[in-house]
Image (cartoon, helix red, strand yellow):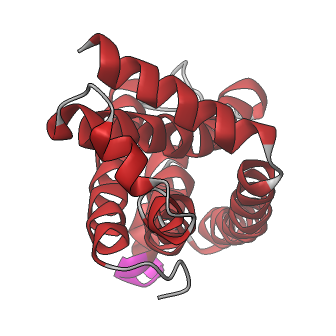
């Protein structure tokens, strides 16, 4: 297990010593921010319509905009889940393909580590980066919690937020695992 953690540390060092991780962080936050602001504007618009006409006279699909958790956070996670589907290959494509392309895979296989430790170490390094990427998106529920207001006390249902965020982290780990599998099949990072 110590070897797997050493490989994970090496992978994390490679990610954070190159601009690649920072480009992915910026892209994830930029796309998420765009959708967050749009969802916030839609929420505000529907709340205004509800004040004027009442919830009973609005279409049933507007019912999700009765609270901040369902109206913004849950919908934002749908978007972040789709974005993660496209971000994970960018983070996982270099895990094995770069080793093969640079002809260092044979050297890695002759090192005194077991193959499962190599796979686990590379996976843990990739999961660390994808979780850091997704961890940046927790700023949106925190912003709603700080600036949101509610007559019932809390602006968000934090149990729903925590459960959804945990699911998002597991989704990111799954997407990274699939990307790592594809990376192990080819030398080309672009494939």
Q: Residue at x 54, y 22 (%)?
A: 154
Q: Nearer the viewer, residue 31 or 58?
A: 31
Q: Is residue 186 above or below residue 63?
A: below
Give the dominant element type of the magenta stretch: helix, strand or loop.
Answer: helix
26 sits to left or right of 70? right
Q: Is residue 87 visible?
A: yes
Q: Is residue 169 visible?
A: no
Q: x%, y% of residue 4?
A: 31, 24
Is 59 included in the stretch rendered in magenta?
yes
Q: x%, y% of residue 97?
A: 45, 68
Furthest toward the top, the residue is: 2
Q: x%, y% of residue 105?
A: 40, 55
Q: Residue at x 36, y 54 (%)?
A: 106
Q: Is residue 95 above or below residue 163?
A: below
Magenta stretch: give its range: 57-61
Q: Nearer the viewer, residue 54 or 163?
A: 163
Q: Nearer the viewer, residue 112 or 41?
A: 112
């Amino acid at each position: 297990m110590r070897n797997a953690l050493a490989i994970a540390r090496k992978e994390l060092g490679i990610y954070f010593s190159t601009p690649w991780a920072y480009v992915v962080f910026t892209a994830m936050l930029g796309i998420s921010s765009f959708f967050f602001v749009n969802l916030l504007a839609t929420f505000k618009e529907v709340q205004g319509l509800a004040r004027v006409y009442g919830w009973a006279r609005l279409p049933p699909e507007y019912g999700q905009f009765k609270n901040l958790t369902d109206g913004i956070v849950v919908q934002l996670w749908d978007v972040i889940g789709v974005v993660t589907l496209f971000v994970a290959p960018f983070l996982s494509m270099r895990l094995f393909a770069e080793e093969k392309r640079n002809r260092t895979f044979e050297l890695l296989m002759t090192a005194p580590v077991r193959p499962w430790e190599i796979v686990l170490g590379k996976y843990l390094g990739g999961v660390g980066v994808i979780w850091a990427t997704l961890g940046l998106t927790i700023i949106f529920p925190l912003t709603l919690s700080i600036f949101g207001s509610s007559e019932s006390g809390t602006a968000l249902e934090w149990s729903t937020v925590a459960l959804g965020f945990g699911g998002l982290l597991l989704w990111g780990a799954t997407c990274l695992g699939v990307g790592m599998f594809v990376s192990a099949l080819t030398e080309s990072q672009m494939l």
